[in-house]
Amino acid sequence: MAGGARDPGRSVTSRVLAILDAFDVDHSRLTLSEIASRSGMALSTVHRLVGELEEWQALRRTADGSYHIGIRLWELGQLAPDSLQAVAHPWLQELFGSTGENVHLAIREGVEVLYVDRVFGKRAVPIVSHTGGRLPMHCTGVGKALLAFEPGWFVTSFLSRPLERFTPHTVTEPGRLSRELAQIRARGYAITHEEMTLGSCSAAAPIIADGVPVAAVGIVVSSRRVRELPRLVDPLLTATDGIARAYHTAVAPPARPRQ
């Protein structure tokens, strides 16, 4: 939530951004009062700016009077270059086709993972991750897969933070998590069992490009089928290796012609 928006010295732009920042995956629909509360601005100011944003289609008002993000922002978002998602999506589709399970792509944003793509079907187990949503690193498969391959200073800093326990199975002890990360680095993939939510488990592997973990791919299955995870590792690693090669090709500078 944006803070300090009641400061009269703030620009109009910063106030508009505070309004947009009030929305997230857990707060996708907000009333004017809720927007004012989450942005820290006076209701009268919010009412005026929201009206302008609605007119521009950055926000849309629903029949019950609440607001959600409008189509104009979605259109602008599609213009953002994202070669990673573009090259990864066909591999995600192939991985889903061969396993029939939830498949998602995530990147690290600060100390969280941001889910940037997902392929799923009707038979797949329900999961809490959503495209555009964020979850902690220490209790998600993709988060652990990324964390294990981050530089040592980042891992040390991360483990010094308080780690929230979401289920009885969430690993929050720094020493235990550090040992688990070492195992993930050694074998190249992570396995989690009911650490974020009860009833689901996952396998995940990082996408390493030029020695850097740029993203991770995860597969989520029901906890009743946890014994099936090992057979999903090979197709998972095939997908991440394929994405890494395709991404390297996509972002590599063009070869200079020989003189």
Image (cartoon, helix red, strand yellow):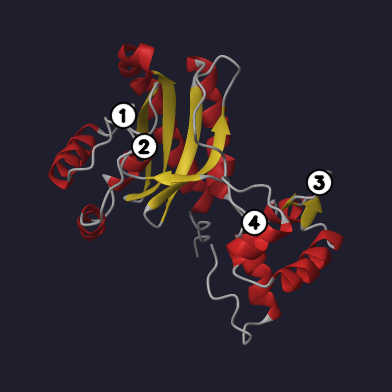
Label 1 element class: strand
Disc nearest the viewer among 4 and 3: 3
Where's residue 143, x and y in %? 36, 42
Using the numbered discs, state the Cα–Cα distance from disc 4 to disc 1 in whole angstroms: 32 Å
Disc nearest the viewer among 4 and 1: 1
Residue beneath disc 1 = 192
Using the numbered discs, state the Cα–Cα distance from disc 4 to disc 3 in whole angstroms: 27 Å
Residue beneath disc 2 = 140
Q: Looking at numbered disc 1 in the image, what kind of residue is underneath it?
A: Thr
Return the mark for residue 106: none
Label 4 or label 3, whichever comes before in sequence order: 3
The residue closer to the viewer here, 205 or 196, is: 196
Residue beneath disc 4 = 80
Residue at x 43% of width, y 35% of height = 217
Residue at x 27% of width, y 34% of height = 188
Label 2 element class: loop
Label 4 or label 1, whichever comes before in sequence order: 4
Q: Is residue 250 above or below residue 96?
A: below
Label 1 or label 3, whichever comes before in sequence order: 3
Circle 1 residues within 10 Å: few <14, some 14–19, many ≥20: many
Q: Looking at numbered disc 4 in the image, what kind of residue is underneath it?
A: Ala
Q: Does residue 28 appear in the picture of this structure?
A: yes
Label 4 or label 2, whichever comes before in sequence order: 4
The residue closer to the viewer here, 41 or 92, is: 41
